[in-house]
Amino acid sequence: MDIKEIQNLIKFVAKSGASEVKLEMGDIKITIKTGSESDTTIVHHAPVAAQIAQTAPPAGQQVVQDTIAPAATPVVAEEDSKHITIKSPIIGTFYRKPSPDKPVFVEVGDMIGEGDVLCVIEAMKLFNEIESEISGKIIKVLIDDSSPVEFDQPLFLVDPS
């Protein structure tokens, strides 16, 4: 995607009245946030290998570029090789509790069984209970409460033995 296409996208979003648009194409991620027609912010994420030349943005618009290193492949130590990672099945916000005044679903050291609720992930105002597909002991909670999660992001480390 060249700078001309990005500028056309900015103009289209500004005219549409949308407050935020996110676009992912391969390894390029673009987020366009608008407060008003005269105040548009673009956040552009590209991997280190794909540097894009930039020209001056249109008047009244601000461009912010972040360069993100490619994701590292997880290295599993020999003692951790027996552990299973439970990953997020959806994109949303991760919650360890069913509501703020209730206790957490699982703690480190808890034994879990198949079908036990481990957490809740909110997606589009729907709270989805995430159930365990394995039995074992919770070794580690890999994400903080009320944090955004991506599809297939590791949530829990479980020892199945």
Image (spheres, rainbow, N blue to C red):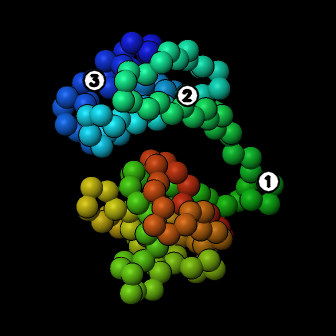
Secondary structure, mark 1, is loop
- Which callout, 1 or 3, points to the residue nearer the camera? 3
For label 2, the crowd category at 10 Å Cα-Cα, with few meaning under 14, some 14 to 19 and many 20 or more, is some
- Which callout, 2 or 3, points to the residue nearer the camera? 3
**In whole angstroms, how far apart are the C-alphas of marks 1 and 2?**
30 Å
Sequence-wise, which precedes: disc 1 or disc 3? Answer: 3
The residue beneath circle 2 is 46
Camera-nearest residue between 38 and 96: 38
**Three-letter code, disc 3:** Lys
Quadrant of the frame with the N terminus = top left
Give the residue drawn at x 50%, y 15%.
55
The residue beneath circle 3 is 11
Secondary structure, mark 2, is strand
The residue beneath circle 1 is 77
Secondary structure, mark 3, is helix
Q: Does residue 29 appear in the picture of this structure?
A: no
Q: Position of residue 48 (x, y in %)?
A: 65, 26
Give the residue drawn at x 81%, y 55%.
78
Tags 1 and 3 in contact by the CB under 8 Å rule? no
Give the residue drawn at x 48%, y 61%.
147
**Three-letter code, disc 1:** Ala
Query: Residue 92 sits in which quadrant?
Result: bottom left
Q: Position of residue 39 (x, y in %)?
A: 33, 37
Tags 1 and 2 in contact by the CB under 8 Å rule? no
**In whole angstroms, how far apart are the C-alphas of marks 2 and 3?**
21 Å
Sequence-wise, which precedes: disc 2 or disc 3? Answer: 3
